[in-house]
Image (cartoon, rainbow, N blue to C red):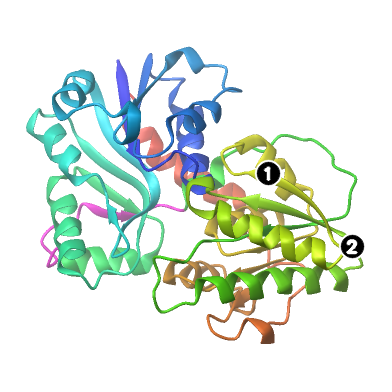
Amino acid sequence: MKISFIGYYGSNFGDLLMLNALIDYYTEYYGQINIYTYGNFDNLYNSFLSNTHLNKIKIFGLSGRDKINYAQFIKSLKGSKYLIWGGGTCFMDQGGTGGVKFMLGANFFKIPVLYLGIGIDSHFKLKTKLLVFLSVFVSKSLYFRDLKSIEAANKLSFGMFDTKIRYVPDIANIKEIQDEIISDNYIIFCCRDLAAYPKLNNEKVNHDLALLAVKICKQLGFNKIVNLICDAEIDEDQGKKAITVFLQNGIDVDTIYGSEIDKSLIAIKNSKFVITSRLHPAVIAQNLNIPYSLYNYSDKNKKFVEEVNEQARLICRYNINKHIADFQNLQKNNLDRVKEEIQSVLVKYIK
């Protein structure tokens, strides 16, 4: 029996983190796992190299040089117990489609469709609203990682399918992190290219965030920043510009790419502070009780700090220079309970 996952994946740290967590869980129950990706094929494959069940995984491209056509998609999908969108903000005006056209094909051939650990961001465009409605219509169940996304999904589907729409904590919470000690004192910096957000000045925001990282590093008495480029396909240019800022200010820099999942997690675990525009470095920092600051470029980041009651850690969208980093310990969260809640959902979809 096989199970299939679909998502953007490729080079994105957050998406790969959730996918790896799902694969770690489901390889015990399925003989084959198909992965359909819109992202970089090689980076996705490399993120699984440490997985002991690598031989069970088959990857299919939905874009680029490795792209399969729709007929090939259907043929490879047949025999799957489920087709699952495995986490991430998959509906937004900036281009998230949730793979609806592939979900419709799966549904036509009687393969149950699921969305696990997803979110909805900006949804003012008619196309985004329609895609959300279709995803709810075609799915067996949709599990959202925040309550505001649940409200949006119910509203956009006119309350017709409320029994399908459910909550699950962010799936990244169940990913185990290796025990490896790094003795250096450093902070983590994660930028986000904002070219798709016309109300924000991409160059200025990222430059100001890099300067804020320098300030925080010096406040802590450190001289090193680990530059975690969470999505090389999107963020690499801004990540390189941040390196220039760090070096100009006498800060040593190491660079890690988000597709190196285990290496990225170990780096976060051993850091003393995290400053990030990307959501999932903050999620990991929260779980590990590592102080962090999270830039509010997207409502999903705001929703996260509100749900964990850490609003002071949110960097104001237009007043980066006025942000005061909070170096105090985080409020305790019951990670074991969160993991149990996630696993109570995942167990429903074993064969």
Measured in 3D between alpha carbons, the distance from the residue under mark 2 to the one under mark 1, in whole angstroms, is: 19 Å
Q: Residue at x 71, y 47 (%)?
A: 255
Main secondary structure found in the magenta portion: loop
Front residue (pair 263, 321):
321
Residue at the disc numbered 2: 222
Q: Give percent across and percent down for residue 100.
A: 19, 46
Task: Check residue 159 for magenta coloring.
Answer: yes
Question: Where, by quadrant of the figure, is residue 131 drawn?
Answer: bottom left
Q: What residue lies at 81% left-to-right and 61% top-to-bottom?
A: 247
Amino acid at pointer 1: Ile
Q: 298 above or below 224?
A: below
For the residue carrying disc 2, how many other residues have a C-alpha within 10 Å: few (<14), some (14-19), or many (20+)? some
Measured as percent of width and height from the top left, residue 257 is found at 62, 43
In this image, 167 relative to 49: left or right?
left
The quarter of the rendered structure image containing the C terminus is top left
Above or below, 41 against 189 in this view is above
- Mark identifier at residue 75: none
Question: Which disc is residue 256 wearing?
Answer: 1
Is residue 127 shown left or right of residue 119? left
Residue 226 seen: yes
Crowd tier of the residue under label 1, counting other residues whose Cα lies within 10 Å: few below 14, some 14–19, many 20 or above: some
> For the residue marked with disc 2, what is the amino acid?
Phe
SS under mark 2: loop
Depth check, front residue: 113 or 277: 277
Q: Is residue 202 magenta?
A: no
Above-or-below relation of 134 to 314: above
Which region shows up in magenta? 157-169
Mark nearer the N terminus (2 vs 1): 2
Q: Position of residue 92 (x, y in %)?
A: 31, 62
| Towards the viewer: 116 or 345 | 116
